[in-house]
Amino acid sequence: MTVPQKVNSMGVRAAQMMGLRRAAEMVGLDYLANGIGITKRNLRQKFDAERGLDAATLNLAADTLDARAHALMLHAEKLRCSAKGEQS
C-alpha cells in the first residue's frame, strides 16, 4: 500500500518539474515557453527549481500540449484525406 504524499512534498515537486521538462521535450522549449507566457530562460529555471512552479504554470503547459495535439490531429486528417484523393 502506498502512502499518500503531501501536495508540497519534495517528491511531488520533483515529479512536477520532470513533467514540465517532458512537455518541453514533446513540443519544444520555445513553443512551451510561449504557451506558458514566459521566456525560455524562466522555463529552464523552473526545470532546475530556481523559479517557483505552481498549478497555473502546469495548467498552461497542459493547455499548450492540448493545442499542439489538436493541430497534429487536424494535420493527420488532412493527410488521410489527401491519401484518399490520390487513390481515387
Image: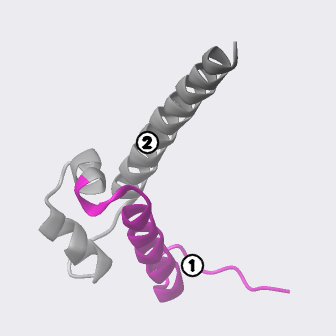
Label 2 sits on what residue type?
Answer: Arg
User: Can residue 47 be found in the magenta stretch?
Assistant: no
Q: Position of residue 85 (x, y in %)?
A: 62, 15
The residue located at (57%, 21%) in the rendering is: 82
Nearest to the observer: residue 24 or residue 11: 24
Nearest to the observer: residue 38 or residue 76: 76
The residue to which callout 2 is attached is 68
Label 1 sits on what residue type?
Answer: Lys
Which quadrant is the C terminus positioned in?
top right
Residue count near mark 2 (Cα–Cα under 10 Å), binned few <14, some 14–19, many ≥20: some
32, above or below 54, in the image: above
Secondary structure under tag 2 reads helix
Q: Range of the magenta residues?
A: 1-30
Secondary structure under tag 1 reads loop
15 displayed left or right of 30: right
The residue located at (28%, 83%) in the rendering is: 48
Which quadrant is the N terminus positioned in?
bottom right
